[in-house]
Image (cartoon, rainbow, N blue to C red):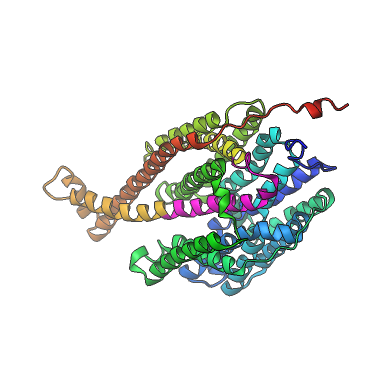
Amino acid sequence: MDTAVASHREVANRGLLVVSVMLATLMQALDTTIANVALPNMQGSLSASQDQIAWVLTSYIVAAAIATPATGWLASIMGRRRLLLVAIAGFTLASVLCALATDIGAMVAFRLLQGLFGASLVPLSQSTLLDVYPREKHGAAMALWGMGVMVGPILGPPLGGWLTESWSWHWVFLINLPVGILAWLGVAASLPTDDTRNTRFDWRGFAFLAIGVGALQLFLDRGELLDWWNSTEIRIELALACLGFYLYAVHWKFSRRAFVDLGLFADRNFLASNLLIFVVGVVLFATMALLPPYMQNLMQYPVVTTGVLLAPRGVGTLLAMMVVGRLLARGVDARLLAAIGMLLTALSLWQMTRFDLDVPAALIIESGVLQGIGIGLVFVPISTVAYSTLPMAARTEAAGIYSLTRNIGSSVGISIVMALLSRNTQVNHAELAERLTPFGHNAHLLEQALRANGGAGLAALDAEVTRQAGGIAFLDDFQLMMLLTLAAIPLLMLLRPVRHRPLPTLAAEP
């Protein structure tokens, strides 16, 4: 039998299924960033400290990271349809519970629950779309899937800011209720029941991998808050992460059926795509973490205005994904499209290195749209090529690994840029302050500050020096992201081009 003929499964209502899984994907992707801007309001309402409120984000990220690799095994014993329905229902219910939380303990517990249920949504939606589309249409399928995965985090902050200011932080979670209900009903009506197999759960492998992934996420998420190597907790988390990954690698080597099959990385396309999606996660989420504080803290933009200026980035991504799916279907080389996308992303970051503290709004929008187009051109081709040479049965497990890689990339990117931002701001402040002497070229600034009410004038001058130092530190981060993007382009040469040949057996059918 021609393997290409069996490369997908027919469903009665593919349109409804696509819309339903896209709603589930969008709901989960939004929640990775939508709560960020609501944290100050939540902190006051829940009577939480700064360290406690940070666990609202950390608990979700860590729970999702630990549970994501289990998607393949859960789908094999429950069936993809049942697991998807349980994940949507659980995520929606946990969202409602988050909105009803009255103290920080309950909120963290419900966010933990939300992360556990939401972990399966993205890999399940990806593998489902790959299975219901033939190989020659996988580019279009990944374009649809990518719209939810990539646009969700981009639209999260502006939507969260608008809901928080117009209503309250509770609506950041309640918005998932109608979306979750529609997604559940659509999946129940359109996704057929699939086969299951009773496989043994690898508890030892799960424990090793959970320790490694969970400790790594805690290390990345809490490092800046606890001053990295000066914290005993951070050193312990890094040691546990290294130990967990090492023990899992040894366990996989000698186990007949390990929890997650690292042998999938023997496929060159899958390995190269994971490396590239790691870079995409670093660049996209690091940039999205930098721009809101740059605009709000240094340029004094309100939350809603910041959201409006960032929203066009999502429009650029949508436009690129609508076009790139059709180009892939017509046989355009995925590597060429991804290379163009990475060059456009690097160009947008170069534009950001030219920002100043009075940058026009038009330039912010222009660079954002350009980066959105670039990310869209990168994301769809590599997501398509990643599974092109894998067997159909391995897609759900591979999708879990792929999603985990992207999430770890985003955590690494955010941690790096925030750590560098803090350190470089201090260094730049010291260098700028050194030039403010009574005998230098900037002596007049010091004299003006002393005349303006003594201490108050000096405080105002110090605030401006801090502002300028922060601005330079942001530009340094943008430059680092640009160089990382350019350095990753040669990885595209590792990808094997995907060519779809016409199937004579199908063409001969009436």
Query: Magenta region: which residues?
Result: 386-415
> Residue 269, can we see it?
yes
Q: Dividing the picture into quarters, in which one does residue 377 lie?
A: top right
> Residue 57, can we see it?
no
In the foreground, 467 or 83: 83
Q: Position of residue 32 (x, y in %)?
A: 58, 55
Magenta stretch holds residue 408: yes
In the foreground, 269 or 228: 269
Q: Total label count?
A: 0
**Along the horizontal axis of the image, is 65 left or right of 225?**
right
Q: Position of residue 311 (x, y in %)?
A: 57, 42
Task: State whether residue 453 is above or below residue 100.
Answer: above
Q: Residue at x 49, y 51 (%)?
A: 409
- Spot the residue most to the left: 439
Q: Position of residue 416 (x, y in %)?
A: 40, 53
Q: Residue at x 45, y 66 (%)?
A: 243
Magenta stretch holds residue 46: no
